[in-house]
Image (cartoon, coloured by chain):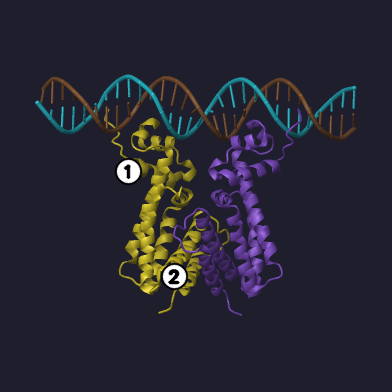
Chain colours: A yellow, B purple, C cyan, D brown
Amino acid sequence: MPRAGLSTTAVVDAALAVVDEQGLEALTLTAVAARTGVAVPSLYKHVGGLGELRVRVGVRVFEETAERMAAVAIGRSRDDAVAALMHAYRGYVLDHPARYAAMVADPLHDPAYAAAGTKLLEVFFAVLGHYGLDGADAVHAVRRLRAVVHGFASIEAAGGFGLAEDTDVTYGQLIDMYLASLPRS
Amino acid sequence: MPRAGLSTTAVVDAALAVVDEQGLEALTLTAVAARTGVAVPSLYKHVGGLGELRVRVGVRVFEETAERMAAVAIGRSRDDAVAALMHAYRGYVLDHPARYAAMVADPLHDPAYAAAGTKLLEVFFAVLGHYGLDGADAVHAVRRLRAVVHGFASIEAAGGFGLAEDTDVTYGQLIDMYLASLPRS
DNA sequence: CCAAAAAGCTAATCGCTTTAGCTTCGAACG
DNA sequence: CGTTCGAAGCTAAAGCGATTAGCTTTTTGG
């Protein structure tokens, strides 16, 4: 009987798959073990426990989001770059709605998040760099941006926009609204 | 031995107290039972189970928020009313940071939320009524508002704004940004 | 006073996490 | 080749929380 050949990465992969398919509440060691074809306690050889697994999942989502946004911002500047970044952020959520809850729900206080969160912030700051904002103004501009994209994305991911109107339109207006709050050339 | 004299309301009250004091993750039937001085299964006489209790907690938070906002909007109009409402929303979160997670985290899909959510939406629509927005535009304006206030509040409640800059300033800018997106008289 | 419903309790089950300790695969090394 | 030893896995068992069943007791309305 060959071994399962698991690894921390493989376990996190399986966890993400569980979340995608059954939602965040379904992220349980039992579910991950079943998916990886291993007994539950075996998972402890790769992750410290359910808590740590949750953190790793959250970090992974953070990283993937940051990656996407960084990729899309290359070769663009100012409003063009900001709009692209906002679309990329929302795009990740549309692709993996269930994951979004994981990104939020968990211990932002955990140190492991710090690194991933910083990476995400750096992308934001880089894109806003073209507007010549000084230190504090840049911080506030980044916060406004986070509030807007996170607010919209989390409501949309949770199915919170019940009415029939097109959410693409709403998001477009949100982008315009945010851009208007940045210093005009 | 007199009875505990519990009621559904009292159980929800205790649940809110647990959330306030120990966070949303600590909301457990065991914790609520301990606080109300009753055995765990006795709680089932008043609430259907943990799931239902969570929903009731979320609904309560919704209602209280809507109430506060409605109260503060009275006697104001347009920008004045919108700003007051935004401050009231954030104020609730500042007063009960831990509760905010409950408002979000839970089944928006649950029908019980519908009524409470509708009440909240009505306040938003009422305040935006002064701007003469037609149907679809009003919907988008309400969504923008929700995205902004919810985004900021949830990040702040989770301790997501790590840097030293004053969050009051950020929120002020967010209010201005949103107001600028509404039709000028 | 009495009956019945409501409120509470104890006992028991179930699912999930976690710990302990054993077994076995497989790779590196003689 | 054969050995050994660490990593990866497993089984067993404990513990905690939710939930269900079924009994007891208080309250309350007639």
SS for dot 1 = helix
Split into 4 quadrants, where in the image is the N terminus of chain B?
A: top right
Residue corresponding to mark 2: A137
Where's residue D19, x and y in %? Answer: 60, 33
Is A5 situated left or right of B97 in this image?
A: left
> From what the image shows, is residue A48 above or below residue A76?
above
Q: Which residue shows up at 55% across the image and 56% down it?
A: A160
Q: Residues within 10 Å of mark 2 (few under 14, many from 20)?
A: some
Residue corresponding to mark 1: A9
Q: Quadrant of residue A84?
A: bottom left
As drawn, the label of residue B11 is none
Do marks 1 and 2 share a subunit? yes
**How far, Cα to Cα, is label 1 from label 2?**
39 Å
Split into 4 quadrants, where in the image is the C terminus of chain B?
A: bottom right
Where's residue A39, x and y in %? Answer: 38, 30
Is B137 situated left or right of B68 in this image?
A: left
Report the front residue among B177 and A138.
A138
Q: Residues within 10 Å of mark 1 (few under 14, many from 20)?
A: few
Report the front residue among C19 and A65.
C19
Q: Which residue shows up at 49% across the image and 43% down it?
A: A25
Where's residue A115, x and y in %? Answer: 36, 53
Three-letter amino acid code of the residue under disc 1: Thr
Please say whether residue B152 is visible from this viewpoint: yes
What chain letter is assigned to the residue under label 1?
A
Three-letter amino acid code of the residue under disc 2: Asp
Q: Quadrant of residue B182?
A: bottom right
> From what the image shows, is residue B160 above or below residue C20?
below
Residue farthest toward the front in the current orientation of the protein: B164
